[in-house]
Image: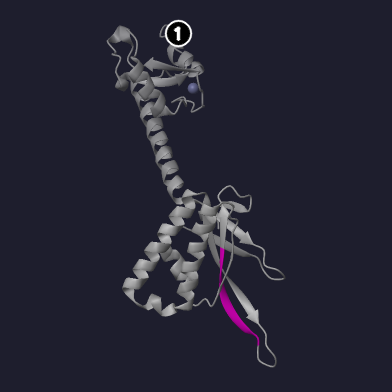
Amino acid sequence: MAFSEDVKIKAMVACGRYCCICHKFCGNNMEVHHIKAQADGGDNSFENAIPLCFDCHAIVRQYDPKHPKGIKFSEKELVQHRDAWYKHMHQENTNARKQCKTNKIEPIKIYHQKGYKNIMLNKVSNGKEILTYLIETYGITYDEEAETLEEVKLIGEFIQNIKELLDFNDLLDEPYDRIMTAFNLTESIKELDRVGFWVFVGKEDKVVTGGIKEPEIFPTLLIRIVRKDSSEIIKVNFENR
Ligand SMILES: [Zn+2]
């Protein structure tokens, strides 16, 4: 009798196909060794199995009690090698999963401002985010690349909604209006996403000079509605920003 397929699979997954003794990645070149030999009454359970590379397996089996040389791998030691390595792999997997969650890849777009510093635009996924940008902005500039009538309509409505918000800024003072506005914008963003667009926003400080007065700065909301597959979109690691 040998180990069942289930036990072997479970063992391969637990060790990540790294040898439990030398910790070398072995791919297909692995064997599952009986910690307590079958001749000594060892069973085919997961608890009695240790995944090893060919080399380590040969060494573990090689020991000749008639001509003892070196230190034999005891059953107890093999169990400890295996358990320590399984634990290590489990920890690695947990860390990798955590990393996937925190190291979010976020798309951004860089707006090349003429004669001024470049501005990083962030992708927005809901209306609330846009509302936070709208506070203390005095205008919007936008750019889009609609091609079909459906796209023109969706983008047109979206921009129109935001323009109205700017024109009637007191709309945002009423909690109910705020919630409804945010909801409508979120729906628009979802619709745009459905037809293949992402919405990016940022703030640009427009400098207005007039006559003898000091130049005035007007923060302006930049909206860029970009096709998801556009080469202008850069994907950055959230953590490394
Ligand atoms: Zn090995």
- Which quadrant: the N terminus? top left
Q: Which residue lies under the disc numbered 1?
A: 67
Viewer-proximal residue among 33 and 149: 149
138 in relation to 143, above or below: below
- Residue 178: image location, x then y, percent: 37, 71
The answer, for residue 123, to whether it is visible in the render is no
The answer, for residue 115, to whether it is visible in the render is yes
Q: Quadrant of residue 46?
A: top left
98 in relation to 52, above or below: below
- Residue 235: image location, x then y, percent: 57, 51
- Which quadrant: the C terminus? bottom right
- Residue 154: image location, x then y, percent: 49, 57
Residue 5 lies in magenta, yes or no?
no
Viewer-proximal residue among 234 and 224: 224
Q: Residue at horizontal 52%, vertical 49%?
A: 196
Stretch of the chain drawn in magenta: 215-223
Q: Which residue is the extreme one toward the front? A: 149
Q: Is 213 left, or right, of 134 in this rendering?
A: right
Residue 217 lies in magenta, yes or no?
yes
* Number of numbered tags placed on the structure image: 1
Q: Residue at horizontal 48%, vertical 54%?
A: 192
Viewer-proximal residue among 42 and 140: 140
109 in relation to 137, above or below: above
Q: Is 65 left, or right, of 156 in this rendering?
A: left
